[in-house]
Image: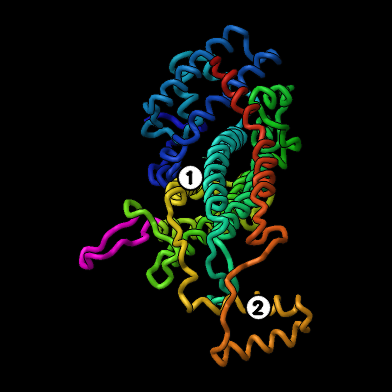
Amino acid sequence: MAKKLWEKNIDVNPEIERFTVGRDRELDLLLARYDILGSIAHSTMLESIGMLTRDEMTALHEELRNIYGIIEEGKFIIEEGVEDVHSQVELMLTRKLGDTGKKIHSGRSRNDQVLVDLKLFTRHELKGVCENVKELFDALIEQSDRHKDVLMPGYTHLQVAMPSSFGLWFGAYAESLADDMLFLQAAYRMCNRNPLGSAAGYGSSFPLNRTMTTELLGFESMNYNVVYAQMGRGKCERNVAYALASVAGTLAKLAFDACMFNSQNFGFVKLPAECTTGSSIMPHKKNPDVFELLRAKCNRLQALPTDIMLIMNNLPVGYFRDLQIIKELFLPAFEALNDCLQMATYIIKRIEANRDILSDSRYDAMFSVEEVNRLAAEGMPFRDAYKKVGLDIEAGTFTPNKDVHHTHEGSIGNLCNKEITALMEGIYSNMEFEKATEAERALLNR
Ligand code: ARG
């Protein structure tokens, strides 16, 4: 069995090893490519301060890029007996390069290594989430524009309330995503700061050039205070989780609406048949399972900030192994959310709205306020008009005028989809993903 990085002259108890390594050997695979990027930047910096010769740096870079290739091919593994990705990479470098491989860990700790890996991973994954959010946003705005004249009942207390429209319904979820994007942007920027060089959490006596690694890795700035850099473990994940949870909240609500409106008792929307599932006993069934699963997954994702918080809860300053467990919750969350976003977009693009809901008299009462407002505009005091229409409805003599005149901003007749789109674009176009992508490409010599 390979020796641990920290193993000296006492053998490791295999049960203790199993318990402490936990799921790291599997989860760290997701961090592997970022571990390489961090090491390329770190070794470049070590050369610049005379801790590595140019030849040693070049050899390390070449081997690190080889390993990156192995990761891309899906052939990278963390060997039996090796604790984590950081140990595996160092082991591979040392096997290949001998003493040069053993020099790379000068001035860093696995604590800042895993911090930088997590930041680079999260930065990359957030980019994917933002792209998927934007796609769903575009689909919703398109459907809103297409259905701007199609009325539907609006509900309060799930009781028929006032006229609404599909333009409003689709557009509401689009605007919700614009707010979620603001959260994602804040999470991205908070994550996009360099912790490398904080080492175990207290810096190093080597004259590290942290400005250099910050630039090489394309970070917006660094986590300056080394103690704070380490304190950011868990905090960064929790804050990103808030942003993911915000998106998930929007999706879960949309999913519930879609399931409800798709039910025969509403009949407001129809999901494309290919997006429904059947029953083993009831031959007529076309169930909205996709939206039901999406709702459950997104409801669960909303627990993520709390789950993370419960692990970090009351930890004092400094590194603790507790933080390792956060990876189990946090790393898989991106794929889960992206999957839901892509499914939602696929169906929203194909969902059909019922253009003839209001011919059903059960919705007549929703025009009551329109009638009250019409009488009030003609001069009858609002309260008297309210009473008259109420009595007419009770007496069964109310006949609705189904012409709806809503003109103010954000209403049925004036959706402000252009303004909502500008809001979204303003945030999305400011995310500065390119800086990160460019820096990573340069580190890989591509
Ligand atoms: N697997 C560890 C984690 O995720 C890596 C850091 C190990 N550091 C330590 N001091 N044991 O936190």
Which label belongs to residue 338? 1
Residue at 65% across / 74% down in the picture? 370
Q: Secondary structure at mark 2?
A: helix
In the picture, measured across the screen, residue 194 lies left or right of residue 310, that is right
Find the magenta span and give its range: 276-290
Q: Nearer the viewer, residue 202 or 372?
A: 372
Image coordinates of residue 11 in percent, x first then y, are: 43, 36
Image coordinates of residue 209 in percent, x first then y, are: 72, 22
Kind of residue indicated by mark 1: Asn
The quadrant of the rendered image in which ligand 1 is seen is top right
Whether residue 181 is visible to the viewer of this picture, yes or no, is yes
Q: Is residue 376 above or below residue 26?
A: below
Q: Is residue 210 above or below residue 171?
A: above
Kind of residue indicated by mark 2: Glu
Whether residue 231 is visible to the viewer of this picture, yes or no, is no
Image coordinates of residue 350 in percent, x first then y, are: 42, 50
Residue at 53% across / 78% down in the picture? 364
**Where, by quadrant of the figure, is residue 374 drawn?**
bottom right
Residue at 71% across / 85% down in the picture? 385
The main secondary structure of the magenta stretch is loop
**Disc number lying in front (2 or 1):** 2
Report the residue marked by disc 2: 371
Instruction: Assign the C terminus to one quadrant of the image.
Output: top right
Query: Is ligand 1 less than 8 Å from the beta carbon at label 2?
Result: no
Residue at 53% across / 51% down in the picture? 146
